[in-house]
Amino acid sequence: MLNIFKRIIALFWILSIGYANEFSLESIELITKANGIIIKLDLDSIPDETNLTCWQANSGWFYITLYKVICDSSTLKKPHLPDGIIDFQIIQGDESLQLGIRLIEPIENYEIKSIKKKNTIIASLHYSTQYFSQLESSIRKNNITVRKTSPKGVKTWLMMTGVGITTAGLLDSRLPKNNYKTKAGILILLSSFFIDRLLEII
């Protein structure tokens, strides 16, 4: 009887050693930025940085492997996928937890930092500098296009002035229909229209 009791104690001791260094993932948050993605992981405690590895696969997936980390799939809420993230997967292995993120652009470099006071890991994933420069160029071009159109207030004022002068010329019974008021009003209307179209083309 004593030998059985000793064996049970030894078994519990072995199991406690095996699971003492495991960490539990409690929540995941994905945040998109102009130049990449931020992944926020909340755990019950922070593992050593040597337990974290990342790499970009040729398939378009970016993987984060957390050794000695486990998660309860029944309680862990799958994160919302914001713009820029096509798909997300959680793979629980025997010795590690793997997070897979499929993005619109491959990740060129990344940075991982731990906030021990909050038991949080922040992974900053950055797109290539070439992709980001193209994105910035597109944004600048769109902003310039918006600014090129004539101000709405000036355009409205010119249109109302043109309509008012044209109407006054047509209603003045003392003057012919093609009088100077009518011509001036029509000229203002046409000028406003052509200036606005010209600014959109340039």
Image (cartoon, rainbow, N blue to C red):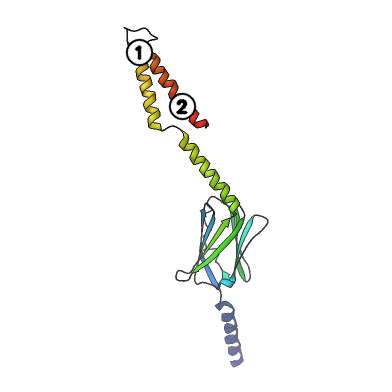
For disc 2, the neighbor class at 10 Å (few under 14, some 14 to 19, many from 20) is few
Residue 8 pos. (x, y %) = 59, 85
Residue 95 screen position, x and y as percent: 62, 71
| Amino acid bearing label 2 | Ile
Query: Which numbered tag is attached to residue 99?
Result: none
In what quadrant of the picture does the N terminus appear? bottom right
What residue is shown with label 2?
Answer: 195
Q: Is residue 174 above or below residue 53?
A: above
- Residue 139 visible in rendering: yes
- Vertical comparison of 127 with 97: above or below: above
Looking at the picture, how far across and down is residue 169, in whole percent? 35, 13
**Mark earlier in primary sequence (1, 2):** 1
* Residue in view at x 38 percent, y 30 percent: 154
User: Residue 57's image quarter?
Assistant: bottom right
- Which amino acid type is shown beneath numbered disc 1? Gly
Who's the residue at 35% across and 15% down the image? 167
SS of the residue at dot 1?
helix
Element class at badge 2: helix
Disc 1 marks which residue? Answer: 169
Q: Nearer the viewer, residue 4 or 110?
A: 110
